[in-house]
Image: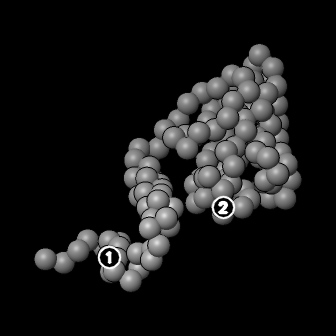
Amino acid sequence: MPLPNGTTVYNKRSLPAKPDELPSFLGRELNIVDRAIKDVSVRSSRTVTADTTVTLDDYLVCADATAGAFAVTLPTARIASGRTFQVKRTSAAGTVTVTAAGTNTIDGAATFALTVQYQSVTVQSDGTEWWVL
């Protein structure tokens, strides 16, 4: 019986040689599987009205800044490697500032401002930085 496409098969030589390297190896492999499962799940959306941090479960964040300006902070690019998020300002008033976590940047800048109603930004992580698509 053939294996499904994308199935990884390990032989004895590809496993870590030292027992103390096994937890790290398994952690990396489980992280890859976890990311793949999340990537095929339904893309979620939520509406926020105050400072918030995007989670790995998010895809679309609708930002209503009617009550005042606030920031939507992206997770670190390393943690969200390969992930895509979209932030959309839905309100007529109030600036929504999309902020990169830590020292990460968004197309080389620390922030990206959404200044008009229905403006949006879609970003993707390369594991080091965030890039506007």
In which quadrant will I find the C terminus? Answer: bottom right
How crowded pointer 1 is (Cα within 10 Å; few <14, some 14-19, many 20+) is rated as few
- Please give the name of the residue rendered at 74% of the width and 59% of the height, measured from the top-left corner: 129
Figure check: 11 above or below 48: below
Residue 29 left/right relative to 88: left
Identity of the residue furthest to the right in this view: 109
Indicate the amino acid at tag 2.
Gly
Q: Nearer the viewer, residue 27 or 69?
A: 27
Mark sitting on residue 59:
none
Figure check: 104 above or below 8: above
Image quadrant assignment for residue 115:
top right
- Please give the name of the residue rendered at 58% of the width and 60% of the height, measured from the top-left corner: 82
Mark 1 or 2, closer to the camera? 1
- Please give the name of the residue rendered at 67% of the width and 45% of the height, measured from the top-left corner: 75
Could you give the CA–CA distance between mark 1 and mark 2, rounded to whole angstroms?
25 Å
> Percent x, y for residue 127?
66, 61
> Percent x, y for residue 41?
40, 47
Chain-order first, disc 1 or disc 2: 1
Q: Nearer the viewer, residue 114 or 49?
A: 49
Indicate the amino acid at tag 1.
Val
Mark sitting on residue 9:
1
> Percent x, y for residue 12?
33, 80
Res. 2 visible in picture? yes
Q: Secondary structure at mark 1?
A: loop
Identity of the residue furthest to the top in this view: 67
Residue 81 left/right relative to 95: left
Residue 57 left/right relative to 119: left
- Please give the name of the residue rendered at 72% of the width and 61% of the height, measured from the top-left corner: 128
Q: Which residue is mark 2?
A: 127
In which quadrant will I find the N terminus? Answer: bottom left
Q: Nearer the viewer, residue 46 or 104?
A: 104
Res. 32 visible in picture? no
